[in-house]
Amino acid sequence: MIRSARMADVKAIYNLLHYFAGKGLLLGRSLSSLYDQLRDFKVWADTGTLGDEAPVLGVCALHICWENLAEIRSLAVAEAEQGKGLGSQLVRACLAEAEKFGINRVFTLTYQPEFFKKLGFRPIDKNELPHKVWSDCIQCPKFPDCNEEALVWERGA
């Protein structure tokens, strides 16, 4: 089940992101930033097994950047759950939320461009993104030599 993240989820979100950040697959987040941006996050939890105590098996965030621009970030699915469509469901939930807010343009920076292309994202030049979106990049150990690809989803495109 996909739902909005809760305070009780923060440590599980942190651990999931930290695991994949350790593999160099995404940018890790501090506990402080997760608490600050908790409202950005959706989680996937198997509530059929443990109700509210179900483990967080997937996470994705929609971060609003500008008037008509948001970012899909921090997408991670536990390795044992990959290949089951959970990542796609999480991204779609975030895109639906963007539409609800009237945001027509959503980008992502990723090492998995083919995954996002299947969801209707198309490649763009990083220079097309406003400078404001690079605030997190400065904290990344790969900055300024990042090889993530920029993709964008546009409603109606």
Image (tube, rainbow, N blue to C red):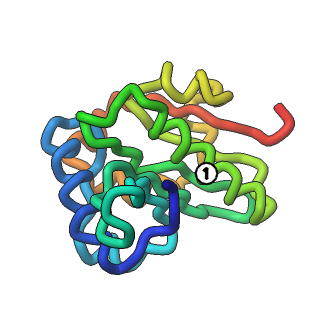
- The amino acid marked with disc number 1 is Ala
Q: Residue at x 50, y 73 (%)?
A: 39
Q: Tag 1, which secondary structure?
A: helix
Q: Residues within 10 Å of mark 1 (few under 14, many from 20)?
A: many
Q: Nearer the viewer, residue 38 or 78?
A: 78
Q: Name the image quarter holding residue 80.
A: top left
The residue that label 1 is drawn on is: 93
Q: Name the image quarter holding residue 28.
A: bottom left
Image label count: 1
Q: Position of residue 22 (x, y in %)?
A: 13, 43
Q: Is residue 132 above or below residue 78?
A: below
| Left or right: where 105 falls relative to 12 | right
| Left or right: where 14 falls relative to 157 | left
Q: Nearer the viewer, residue 81 or 26?
A: 81
The quadrant of the picture occupied by the C terminus is top right
Q: Residue at x 16, y 47 (%)?
A: 19
| Left or right: where 91 falls relative to 60 | right
Q: Residue at x 46, y 39 (%)?
A: 86
* Residue reaching furthest to the left: 22
Confirm whether residue 93 shows in the render. yes
Q: Position of residue 58 (x, y in %)?
A: 37, 49
Q: Name the image quarter holding residue 83.
A: top left
* Residue reaching furthest to the front: 49
Q: Position of residue 50 (x, y in %)?
A: 31, 64
Q: Is residue 125 above or below residue 77?
A: above
Q: Position of residue 67 (x, y in %)?
A: 73, 64
Q: Is residue 67 above or below residue 95?
A: below
Q: Nearer the viewer, residue 55 or 37?
A: 55
Q: Nearer the viewer, residue 33 or 132?
A: 33
Q: Residue at x 77, y 62 (%)?
A: 100
